[in-house]
Image (cartoon, rainbow, N blue to C red):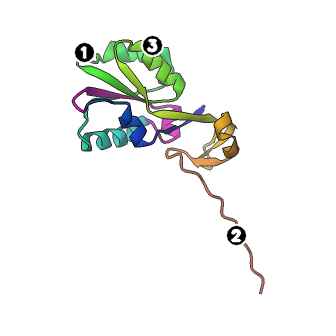
Amino acid sequence: MIFSKVLPYKKIIEQLGDRETKIAIISCNGCARICGCGGFDGANKLRFKLIRDGYNVTDVIVVLYACSELSLKELKRKIKLTSEIKTIISLACSAGWACITRNFPDKKVINATEDIGLIVIDKEKEVFKLTLPYKKFEHQAKNEYEIGTGELVSRKKIIKLEA
């Protein structure tokens, strides 16, 4: 699985253009949801910020795996994005962004995330661990993060004081 984080809000809006443009958000419900940047929660969090700031977000679509051509082809069959939508914001890893871009060639597709590296999940502890970070994030190797939020888990050591 790929660990992605949402870009700073300012970097996302810098890519949008004017506020009247109709926008759709396509969010991944796989890796991106587990990492806290996608799924319904991630999409709605971004949607409400954009609407609050006057952007015209008309659609929020959550797909099982944005990196899957099958998921997106099924999506295109069930949901027709109107020609009025000019911009799609991708809340997925770079593979999901590339897949969305291929499937909607007539739309401007913004990648609103940055890939950190590959992860493994420990469902019992409700964490995921960064096992193979990308070069820029090597210093974060072996860090653990909360499933669903992507927040760094700090392990506080308990020191036993002797009297």
Could you tell me the amino acid type at mark 2? Ile
Residue that numbered label 2 is attached to: 158
Q: Callout 3 environment at 10 Å: few (<14), some (14 to 19), or many (20+)?
A: some
Give the percent coordinates (x, y) of residue 54: 23, 39
- Mark before the other along the chain sequence, 2 or 3: 3
Q: Does the magenta stretch include residue 29?
A: yes
Tags 1 and 2 touching, CB below 8 Å: no
What range is drawn magenta here? 19-38
Which label is found at residue 83? 1
Q: Which amino acid does the dot numbered 1 rest on?
A: Ser
- Location of residue 135 (image quadrant): top right
Q: Image check: 14 left or right of 116?
A: left
Task: Residue 119: tell me if it is visible.
Answer: no
Q: Residue at x 21, y 30 (%)?
A: 20
Q: Residue 102 carries which label?
A: 3
- Is residue 111 inside the magenta stretch? no
CA distance separating discs 1 and 3? 16 Å
Q: Seen in the image, is 82 located left or right of residue 63?
A: left
- Residue placed at 58% from the left, 51% from the top? 152
Task: Where is residue 100? Give x, y as percent.
Answer: 43, 19
Instruction: Find residue 92 and report its horizontal and vertical position in percent.
Output: 48, 30
Q: Are marks 1 and 3 in contact (CB under 8 Å)?
A: no
Element type at mark 2:
loop
In this rendered view, identify the residue nearer to me: 141 or 122. Answer: 141
Q: In this view, does 163 lie above or below 24?
A: below
